[in-house]
Image (tube, grey):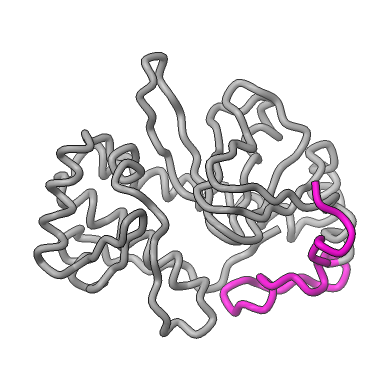
Amino acid sequence: METGQRRTPCQSCPLRALERFRDFTPAELEFVARFKIGELHLPAGNNFLIENAESANLYTVLGGWAFRYKVLQDGRRQILNFALSGDLVGLQGTLMGEMQHSVEALTPVRLCVFQRERILEVYRNFPSLAFDLTWLAAREERMLDENLLSVGRRSALERAAYLLVFLHVRARALCPGRLEKVFLPISQQHVADTLGLSIVHTNKTLRKLAERNLIRWHGRSCEVLDEDGLRKVAGWYDEIEMHRPFI
């Protein structure tokens, strides 16, 4: 847990400077500053929430990427979705006691840490923030709906195109200038574990997208070259919400 100079004051949170996030009222900002008990800085590969374990905290991603996943007894992993800056993780454990999935840092991450036991204060005293929590939970359900549609009905090519363009649009929305290149910090194994495909099938599928000049791989990251082209392959034309809450 980081405190002192390395802790980012809520009043100067870098996320509040981005247009896509709704601003707090003065009273909300004061409460969130007290609700936050510290920051957690983790390198890539570290788990900060564990399936079947209880956690005293919930987290907002301040910087970096993480992913939620479940593992079968034989070691096969299913990545459920990805968490980027502004996303709340750990709410499931807060409401249900035990986590039903694990969360791992995909890149080095900075996390705002909140006390789980104080979540009732949000619902009791700040209905607008309580609505925000409900909105975030509904948004999570919406993303899982699309992932289920991919695994159940989209072809391998459509699945890969949807995943990459969806992550690209989410990541681009967090860039202040919107003009710089966006590199998705995922490996082909991450893609395979998200899409429910073998690594061999995934490699062949991604190669087809690269041959169409839609994407380019850079080691353990992916660059989207043609967003519209990927949307067309995926059959996905929704827009990412451009004004959303965070805690």
Q: Is residue 75 left or right of residue 7?
A: left
User: Between 152 and 65, which is closer to the camera in this rendering?
Assistant: 65
Quadrant, the C terminus = bottom right
Q: Is residue 92 left or right of residue 68?
A: right
Q: In which quarter of the view is residue 221 placed? A: bottom left
Q: Is residue 8 left or right of residue 84?
A: right
Question: Can you give x and y, in whole percent of width and height, for residue 26 in the image?
Answer: 86, 73
Q: In which quarter of the view is residue 57 placed? A: top right
**Is residue 7 in the magenta section?**
yes
Look at the image and give the residue range highlighted in magenta: 1-29
Residue in the picture at 39% in, 59% down: 167
Residue in the picture at 41% in, 14% down: 73
Q: Is residue 92 left or right of residue 218?
A: right
User: Between 134 and 143, which is closer to the camera in this rendering?
Assistant: 143
Question: Can you give x and y, in whole percent of width and height, for residue 46 in the image?
Answer: 59, 39
Residue in the picture at 45% in, 66% down: 171
